[in-house]
Amino acid sequence: MANPINMQFPISRGAAGAFAYNEDTLEAVEDDLRILLLTNYGERPIHFDFGANLRSLIFEFQGEALNQAVKDRILSAVEQWMPFVKVVNVTVENSSTAPQLGPNDIHVKVEFTVGNLDVTKVLVQRIKT
């Protein structure tokens, strides 16, 4: 096994019987970013304000104002908790812009790069009730 960086998210069993680990920097950062997006304020002991707190927005009026609020929270959370990540683009869809989504679902696509790596990675995440 190569040098593990962190556990894969969601947590799963690895080939050796323990947890599966990320061995690639971009994959590790993608999992960390996914955890940041899915975490709401108060869910992490000691760090009450850790996370993007997106779930609190899913019952808001579906429209461009909601999309902008989601983008702002993502950018703010990444700046505070993952300053080594450069967000290239954030795309947000909700049921008013993507009818296939449920009435309280938000679909987020974050394009990012890490440090001096010359590679852009895309994280796609659905936030739902």
Image (cartoon, rainbow, N blue to C red):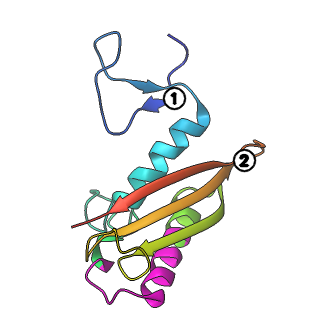
The kind of secondary structure the magenta stretch mainly shows is helix
- Kindly identify the residue that appears in the image at 58 percent across and 67 percent down: 90
| Disc 2, SS | loop
Furthest residue in direction left, as rendered: 129
Task: Please say if the residues under marks 2 and 1 sit with CB atoms less than 8 Å apart.
Answer: no
Q: Is residue 10 left or right of residue 64?
A: left
- Quadrant in which the C terminus is drawn: bottom left
Q: Is residue 9 magenta?
A: no
**Mark with earlier residue (2, 1):** 1
Give the structural element (helix, strand or loop) at label 1: loop
- Residue at figure coordinates x 37%, y 39% from the top left: 9
Q: What residue does disc 1 label?
A: 5
Q: Which residues are magenta?
A: 57-75
Q: CA distance from mark 2 to mark 1?
A: 16 Å
Amino acid type of disc 2?
Gly
Q: How many discs appear? A: 2
- In the displayed structure, 69 sits above or below 89; it is below
Place of residue 79 in the rendered image (x, y in percent of width and height, measured from the top left): 59, 65
Label disc, if present, on residue 94 of the rendered structure: none
Which residue is nearer to you in this view: 107 or 116? 107
Residue type at the position of mark 1: Ile
Residue assigned mark 2? 115
